[in-house]
Amino acid sequence: MMGVLSSSSEWNFPFRCCLYSLVPRNRFRPKKKIHFDPKIVLLRQKNIPAESNVESDLRSFRRKMATAGSSNGIIKQGSAWFQRKVNLRPVHRGCHLVTDELLKQIPEVSQFSIGLFHVQIMHTSASLALNENWDPHVRADMEMFLTQLVPESTPFKHSCEGPDDMPAHIKACFLGSSLTIPITDGQLNLGTWQGIWLCEHRNRAGSRKVIVTINGVLQE
């Protein structure tokens, strides 16, 4: 049999294929699984030498990753977290500029030299957007477009709270529920004409709740 398997003649080929099909498939798999240490892989990816003491190297790597740069180019170290629930006043249907209203309830922004400002609305019939902060006609035009895009006359199945119910959910999906804005030297680093919009999609709605989370480096 070994002679048949070792021969290279063509008439042996079907016979060898038949024998191969009888061998369990796991025969050709490694007996032991190869386990990769994520700590070592992480260190190598960041060009930090993986020495015998991996834990100490990992701690050193984490300390290096905790540094952040400010607008003046100075590298600062350390990280702080902040979170608060904010209630925005009830508004009529449409797009409303709420940047100042939001920041008045989050004065802690000024304590961060660099970081990220994340705001999440806690509703499914209103949304947040980042857009024009000067001309109110932009907000009026946006509401007109959204109304034409999702007309209330559409025969939606979900209408238990009125004809504006399902259109509000659809508009909220289009615009989104959260924003992330950089913080630089204690202020939101927005463009000249950028502002935070609360887009109210219901005809009659109450106060809207948002969660603000800040992560960054504190001012010295």
Image: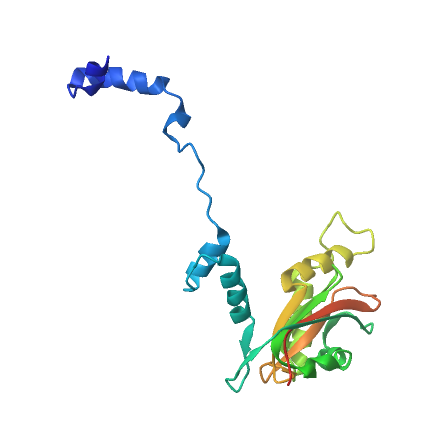
Q: Residue furthest top?
A: 1
Answer whether residue 182 is visible to the viewer in this image: no
Count of numbered badges drawn on the protein: 0
Answer whether residue 219 is visible to the viewer in this image: yes
Residue 70 in which image quadrant: bottom right
Q: Position of residue 201 (x, y in %)?
A: 74, 65
The C terminus is located in which quarter?
A: bottom right
Residue 187 in which image quadrant: bottom right
Q: Is residue 105 above or below residue 199?
A: below
| Residue at (49% x, 63% y) in the render | 57
Q: Nearer the viewer, residue 70 or 213?
A: 70
Q: Residue furthest left?
A: 9
| Residue at (52% x, 87% y) in the render | 72
Q: Nearer the viewer, residue 191 or 180?
A: 180
| Residue at (83% x, 72% y) in the render | 90
* 171 on left or right of 40: right
The N terminus is located in which quarter?
A: top left
Q: Position of residue 98 (x, y in %)?
A: 73, 77
* 17 on left or right of 81: left
Q: Position of residue 11 (x, y in %)?
A: 18, 15
Q: Nearer the viewer, residue 168 or 9?
A: 9
Q: What colouring method underlies this structural image?
A: rainbow
Q: Position of residue 111 (x, y in %)?
A: 69, 82
